[in-house]
Image: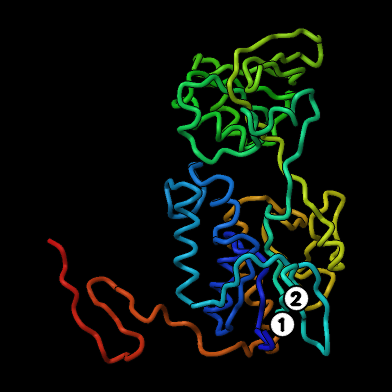
């Protein structure tokens, strides 16, 4: 642990994995500190079976498939990965960053990339009666296994992309799906909203706007829910076995404040040119950050990962210098029908082509 790494990336989600990959291809040897015992972040931990449609070049995959593919890609550059390490304190000693974990371990590096995503976030609660009581007994803020909703009557609450996605996904699994949202405006992409509205008009789902939950009833698990129109106070009781709250997440920013990072009113890290924070040598990317024009899409995380690799390289080595030679691909790779062994560039052999 006395070794000084080029860069330590806090977080092994999509943003952190790609940051590690790009840092590695730029000749640096990154370390990834992950608080869980697996890589993949939110995609693997919260939404393993959620369909993902907005990754360039991939028409459709699940959250787990995306996490697995990104992990495999990042592992090609052989980063050092430490699991079950939650960073508690970051301090600089003689120009070197010391990352002190809750486990007591200390890791050192020349630069730090914060890519904690929603790992340091908690779901936003709506505060209606029974919300805490029924959590885990039919009420949830994430969906891990789609088949658990097979044959159920499901209520989805929210107006963002997650609410739209789960409504589309579960309508063919659940017995029925009802979506409620507290106002006319939506945060979700307009195309997704129009799709949901068309489903409602076709009778494939039920959509109630502007409605909120008034109370939940049930002996040990949810049996029915009373919702009300927040403009007319009209009430409707629905037979429901599962409630999915899609109100977003809020950051648990105690650690971020402790690290001295500049946060906005939402508790997100303010970043500037090339993913820089207010502290030189500490960079931030992904869902934990915000800047003018930021959209919380995975494609933006990938762009930020590429940008931060260049910024870290410049910070460590100086502009235009970089680390070792540019990465030329994995030790063994296939190009068309030729397998190339990068340990010996002259070792090229044909690979049989399937007819």
Give the secondary structure at mark 1: strand
Q: Is residue 155 left or right of residue 70?
A: right
Q: How is the image coloured?
A: rainbow
Q: Disc 2 marks which residue?
A: 99
Position of residue 211 measured from the top left corner of the image (x, y, whole percent)? 73, 18
Q: Is residue 246 above or below residue 200?
A: below
State which tag comes first along the sequence, 2 or 1: 2
In this view, the residue in front, 321 or 83, is: 83
Q: Residue at x 46, y 67 (%)?
A: 73
Q: Residue at x 51, y 30 (%)?
A: 168
Instruction: Kindly indicate the quadrant of the structure image that contains residue 15.
Output: bottom right
Question: Which quarter of the image is occupied by the C terminus?
Answer: bottom left
Position of residue 231 measured from the top left corner of the image (x, y, whole percent)? 81, 14
Q: Is residue 37 above or below residue 326?
A: above
Could you tell me how far apart the alpha carbons at marks 2 and 1 are, in whole angstroms? Answer: 6 Å
Give the secondary structure at mark 2: strand
Q: Callout 2: few (<14), some (14-19), or many (20+) C-alpha neighbours within 10 Å?
A: many
- Furthest residue toward left: 355
In this view, the residue in front, 115 or 222, is: 222
In this view, the residue in front, 154 or 195, is: 154
Position of residue 34 measured from the top left corner of the image (x, y, whole percent)? 63, 65
- Furthest residue toward front: 220
Q: Callout 1: few (<14), some (14-19), or many (20+) C-alpha neighbours within 10 Å?
A: many
Q: Disc 1 marks which residue?
A: 108
Instruction: Kindly indicate the quadrant of the structure image that contains residue 298.
Output: bottom right
Q: Are marks 2 and 1 in contact (CB under 8 Å)?
A: yes
- Label disc, if present, on residue 294 of the rendered structure: none
Q: Is residue 252 left or right of residue 63?
A: right
Question: Which quarter of the image is occupied by the N terminus?
Answer: bottom right
Instruction: Kindly indicate the quadrant of the structure image that contains residue 268.
Output: bottom right
Q: Residue at x 63, y 23 (%)?
A: 221
């Amino acid at each position: 642990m006395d070794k000084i790494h080029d860069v330590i990336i806090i977080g092994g989600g999509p943003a952190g994995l790609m940051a590690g990959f790009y840092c590695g291809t730029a000749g640096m040897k990154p370390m990834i500190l992950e608080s869980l015992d697996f890589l993949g972040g939110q995609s693997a931990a919260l939404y393993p079976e959620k369909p993902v449609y907005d990754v360039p070049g991939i028409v459709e995959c699940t959250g787990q498939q995306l996490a697995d593919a990104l992990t495999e890609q990042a592992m090609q550059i052989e980063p050092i990965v430490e699991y079950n390490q939650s960073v508690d304190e970051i301090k600089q000693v003689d120009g070197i960053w010391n990352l002190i974990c809750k486990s007591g371990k200390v890791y050192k590096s020349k630069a730090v990339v914060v890519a904690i995503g929603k790992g340091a976030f908690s779901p936003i609660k709506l505060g209606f009666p029974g919300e805490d009581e029924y959590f885990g007994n039919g009420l949830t803020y994430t969906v891990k296994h789609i088949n658990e909703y097979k044959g159920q009557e499901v209520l989805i609450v929210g107006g963002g992309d997650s609410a739209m996605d789960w409504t589309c996904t579960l309508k063919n699994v659940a017995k029925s799906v009802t979506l409620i949202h507290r106002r006319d405006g939506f945060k979700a992409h307009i195309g997704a909203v129009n799709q949901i509205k068309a489903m409602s008009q076709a009778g494939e789902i039920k959509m109630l706007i502007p409605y909120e939950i008034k109370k939940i009833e049930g002996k040990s698990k949810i049996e029915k829910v009373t919702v009300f129109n927040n403009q007319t106070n009209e009430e409707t009781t629905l037979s429901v076995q599962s409630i999915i709250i899609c109100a977003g997440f809020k950051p648990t920013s105690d650690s971020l404040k402790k690290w001295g990072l500049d946060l906005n009113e939402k508790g997100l890290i303010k970043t500037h040119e090339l993913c820089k924070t207010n502290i030189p040598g500490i960079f931030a990317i992904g869902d934990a950050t915000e800047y003018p024009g930021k959209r919380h899409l995975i494609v933006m995380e990938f762009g930020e990962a590429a940008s931060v690799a260049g910024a870290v390289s410049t910070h460590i080595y100086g502009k235009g210098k970089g680390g070792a030679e540019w990465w030329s691909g994995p030790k063994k790779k296939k190009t068309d029908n030729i397998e190339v062994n990068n340990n010996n560039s002259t070792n090229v052999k044909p690979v049989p082509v399937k007819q």
